[in-house]
Image (tube, rainbow, N blue to C red):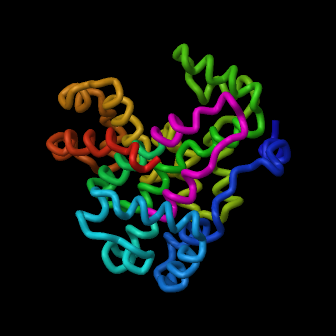
Amino acid sequence: MELGDIFDRAAGRMPMVPKVVQELIASFDRANTDVDSIADKVSHDQVLSAKVLRLANSARMSGGRAVRSIEDAVVLLGFDNLRMLVVASGVSSMSAPNPGFDRQAFWRRSFQVATAARCVARYARIDANTAYTVGLLHNIGELLIHVAFPTESVKIDRLVDTGADRIQVENMVIGLDLTQVGEELAKRWHFPEEIQRAIRQHKNPTAFPQFEPLAGVVALADLLVTEFVKGIDDAGVIDTLPANLLDKLGVSAELLGPDLEKIREQCMAVDDLL
């Protein structure tokens, strides 16, 4: 199976994100983004702007301040936070026309990993909003596989539910895995190369010759969320953190430890974003 075959099979059913969201993600590596133009484009997309304002008015983002317009969001939250909200609102509307695809569970996990990645990023001295975006999109290839292979995806999910490794199963069943598909989708959406690399490498970031710190942050965030969902206490979480990954990221478990409870609380409270 070639990558192009998957996109051919998904033609006409491939999940799309609004053009303005693609522009915003592409702008992560540009310093001269026209904020007014972006805000105007978001304002003219009624569905997208409604979702952005709902998220902006959540207690976590607004701090009790009313955000009544996209212009208010720019002033009160700043462009970086607005960009993150627009990206989150735009991509989380994507789904797969497959009865076997649990959209709610997929995006809940994506938001949890994104939230953890945003928290962890500051320890690794990486832009938090970029880390959030990669965390949100890290498994986007899985969604596309559900679109292109609805029958096979049900079998894959069933095997994963019994404890099998998703990457290994996907390669056995269709000859490709979600990281390869996700990287190609990010490339077709013209996302920055570091985001493409992070999506490709996040399942095993230390195995690649060129270590991508964004992939490392998302991998660490994914591990944290797994432990949080299992109910592992903070001491247990610290014990399971991989030393090699922490070393490559320059992150100290001793510094991360005191903030784990706060990170846990934020990760477990993402349902208002769905």
Residue toward you, 221 or 107: 107
- Is residue 150 shown above or below 80? above
- Location of residue 177 in the rendering, given as x and y in whole percent from the top left corner: 66, 35
The residue drawn where x is 31% and y is 61% is: 61
Decide which of 26, 86 is in the foreground and name it. 86
Residue 54 placement (x, y as % from top left)? 42, 60
In the rendered view, does 29 fall on the left or right side of 263? right
Give the residue drawn at x 47%, y 56%: 133
* Residue 166 position (above or below residue 118): above
Give the extent of the magenta segment: 84-109
Task: Describe residue 263's horizontal placement relative to residue 197 as left or right.
Answer: left
Residue 154, horizontal then vertical, whole percent: 69, 24
Q: Is residue 131 left or right of residue 197?
A: left
Answer whether residue 32 is visible to the viewer in this image: no
Is 254 placed left or right of 91 in the picture? left
Q: Is residue 88 magenta-colored?
A: yes
At x 29%, y 65%, the residue is 62
Q: How many marks?
A: 0
Q: Is residue 270 magenta?
A: no
The residue closer to the viewer here, 9 or 242, is: 9
State the image quarter where residue 258 is shown. Answer: top left
Give me the residue at 55% from left, 64% from top.
48
Q: Which percent across, then down, holds residue 36? A: 49, 85
